[in-house]
Image (cartoon, rainbow, N blue to C red):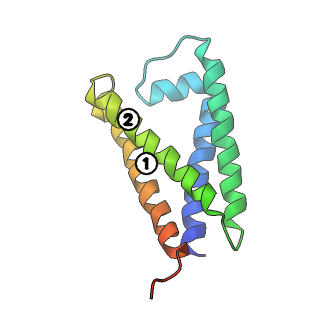
């Protein structure tokens, strides 16, 4: 199994788990994360977020089986991770989220970003 395939499958699994939890048990998942339960009408938006988690998870599984992965997919997931990190840092810095709540998601964002950059480096042609 190649490095690229392992990374894509790891991120795919995380996306599928996030998607399943936000779609099927959003209140439970949000409270388990240590966040306040949003108003009931917010679950509509959370359900739409779940669709994106699930779609990206399935796409990454498909891409993990391919010989070549278009760089756009990697760049899109890298952008998602960096935005996740920035949002976590912002809401932690202004005191909305305690570090105990934001640390694990931010760690994952840094980890996944580093792993995606590793794939990107592997795909770049060697400089002579």
Q: Is residue 9 left or right of residue 85?
A: right
Q: Residue at x 70, y 53 (%)?
A: 59
Dividing the picture into quadrants, the one containing residue 19 is: top right
- Give the side of residue 69 with respect to residue 98, left or right: right
Q: Position of residue 112 (x, y in %)?
A: 46, 55
Which mark identifies residue 72? none
Q: Residue furthest bottom?
A: 128
Residue contact between numbered discs 1 and 2, judged by CB atoms under 8 Å: yes
Query: Disc 1 marks which residue?
Result: 109
Residue at image coords 62%, 22% = 45
Q: Residue 82: image x %, image y %?
A: 44, 46
The percent position of residue 121, horizontal first and vertical second, equals 47, 71
How many callouts does the rendering have?
Answer: 2
Q: Give whichever of 81, 33 is nearer the camera.
A: 81
Q: Is residue 127 above or below residue 15?
A: below
Q: Is residue 2 above or below residue 93?
A: below
- Residue 24 in view: no
- The N terminus lies in which quarter of the figure? bottom right
**Residue with the mark numbered 2:** 88
> Going 60% across and 31% down the picture, which residue do you hit?
22
Decide: is 12 above or below 97: below
Q: Earlier in the sequence, mark 1 or mark 2?
A: 2
Few, some or many residues within 10 Å of mark 2 (<14, 14–19, 20+): many
Task: Name the image quarter holding the C terminus.
Answer: bottom left
């Amino acid at each position: 199994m190649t490095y690229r395939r392992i990374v894509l499958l790891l991120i795919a699994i995380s996306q599928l788990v996030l998607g399943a939890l936000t779609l099927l048990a959003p209140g439970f998942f949000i409270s388990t994360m240590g966040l306040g339960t949003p108003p009931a009408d917010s679950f509509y938006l959370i359900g739409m977020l779940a669709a994106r988690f699930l779609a990206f998870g399935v796409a990454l599984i498909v891409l993990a089986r391919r010989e070549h992965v278009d760089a756009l997919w990697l760049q899109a997931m890298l952008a998602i991770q960096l935005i996740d990190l920035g949002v976590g840092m912002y809401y932690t810095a202004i005191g909305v989220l305690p570090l105990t709540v934001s640390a694990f998601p931010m760690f994952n964002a840094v980890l996944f970003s580093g792993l995606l950059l590793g794939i990107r480096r592997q795909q770049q042609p060697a400089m002579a």
